[in-house]
Image (spheres, helix red, strand yellow):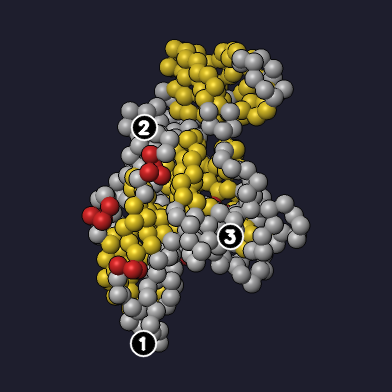
Amino acid sequence: MDTNGMFRGTLQARGCMFLPWPGDTNRYVLLHTTKEFTLPIGTPGWISYILPRHLYYSVFDKTLNNGNGGFIGLNQIIVTDTLTNWGGGLAVTKHANGRDWWIMVKKHYKNRFYKFLLTPAGIQPMGYQLIGLDNQARLLDIYCFSPNGEIVAGNIGFSGYAHDIVLMNFDRCTGLLSNHQIISNPNNPNHGCEDADFSPDSRFLYSTERVKIFQYDLLNIQTPGAVQASRTVVADTAFSTSICDTPSITNIKTQYPFGALAADGRIYYPPSYGCQELSYFNAPDSFGLASDFIYGGLNIVNQHFASTPYYPNYRLGPVAGSVCDTLSVGVEEWQASQVSIFPNPTQNSVNVSLGRTCEEIQCNFYNMQGQMLFQEKRNFGNAFTLDIPNLSKGLYLLEILCNEGRVVKKVVVN
C-alpha cells in the first residue's frame, strides 16, 4: 500500500500491523507506514535511506460487501513527521484496562516518542515524550514491547553494524516511559544488532548479531548495570554445521537476523538467505543454554528472507488491582475533552473541572521524560485547584485517575 507513489512502498521491517477495534469484533485497524521522504544532504541527522513521513491507519469492516469485508477508510493520517526509517519505530501494547491499545512511533534523529490510544471512540492522540539519547542519526531504531507490556526494547545505532540496545520501562496505565538505559552487544566488524525479541514470560531479551544471539536477563532491570552484566551467548553459527538445504543455495551457513515470538512460545528465526529452514529457541523462558536453540530445525515450504512479522500480545489482559483494571459498563466513557484546565499556560496553579463527579481522585504531574514531579489525592469532587510548585518553563502532563476512569491533559508552565 504505497500512499505517495514511491517505488519502495512498504519496504521496511515492522511497518504494518492489524489491531482489533476495541469493543467491536467486526472491525480492525491496519496501522502502516511507507517510505516517502529523503532528507536533503547536509540536513542534521542525514542518512541515505528513504524515511517514513506518516503513520497511517485504515479501518477494515468484516460486514461489508455481503460479509466479504472491506475498508471504511484508507490511509488516514495519524501523525506527520520524519519517522525512523524502519517502520517508524512502530510498537504496540495493550492498555492497562485490557481493552484499548497503546500505539507508539519515534521521530528520526530525535528522542521524541509519539503516543496514541486506540479506544472504542477511535485513535486518540496522547502527546509525545522526550526520553533518551537526542540528536542520533540511526539506520535502525526498531522497537517492540515485552509480552507483559512493561518493557520496551529497540536496537539502535548509526551504522549497519550497530551493537546497542535501548531498554525502557513502560506504564500501561499512564503510557509513560522511564528508566532509559543502553546495553551493548560485543563489537563485531562484520555484523550488527538487527533485532530484539522477548521471552514469553518477559524475563529474557534476545538480541541477534546475525551469526550470534545473546540473551539478557531483565529480572533486575531497575539495578544499574545488572542487565548488561547478565549477557550470555546462547546461539552461534560456530556451534553448528547447519548449511542451507535449498538446492539453488550451497555452502551458505544459516544466519539469524530477525526473530519473532510465536503463539507456541518459541522464538523463530528465518535465515538471512533464501533457505527453507527456520531455527528457533525451544525454551526461551529458560536461562542460558537451557533456552535450547535448534539450528535449522524446522523445514518450511517456501524460501524466506528475514521476513518475520511483528505480532503484539493480543491476549494481554488488564493490570489487576490498578485504577485501570476495570471498565465502565453502561456508562459513557470519560473523555479528555470533558476535562477543562485553566489557565493554561499557567505559572503556579491550575483550576481543574472534571465534567463529572468523581471519587478517590489522584493527580500525578509528570515532566516529558516520564518523571513524576508531585502527586495529590482527593476523596471526592468535580472541580478543584491544583497548586504547581516552582517548575521550569515547558510542557508537562497532568494525569487524573479516579474510579470513573483516567484522563491525561497537557499543562504549559510559563
Dot 1: what SS?
Answer: loop
Q: Are marks 1 and 2 in contact (CB under 8 Å)?
A: no
Q: Quarter holding the C terminus?
A: top right
Precedes in sequence: disc 3 or disc 1: 3
Residue 247's disc number: 1
Numbered tag placed on residue 340 in the rendering: none
For badge 1, the amino acid type reads Pro
- What's the residue at 48%, 61% (across, down)? 188
The answer to which quarter of the image holds residue 383 is top right
User: Is residue 28 visible in this depiction of the protein?
Assistant: no
* Quadrant of residue 384 within the rendered picture: top right
Residue drawn at (38%, 39%) of the image: 226
| Cα–Cα gap, marks 1 and 2 | 54 Å
In depth, the one of 60 and 101 nearer the eye is: 101
In the image, what residue type sits under mark 2? Asp
Give residue 155's position: percent from left, percent from top: 49, 53
390 and 174: which is toward the camera: 390
How far from the left and from the top, in percent, is residue 133? 59, 43
Q: CA distance from mark 3 to mark 2?
A: 42 Å
Residue at image position (40%, 84%) is: 249
Q: Position of residue 31 (x, y in %)?
A: 52, 55
Q: Quadrant of the N terminus?
A: bottom right
Q: Amino acid at mark 3?
A: Ser
The residue carrying mark 2 is: 325
**How many labels sit on residues?**
3
**Residue located beneath label 3 in the image:** 159
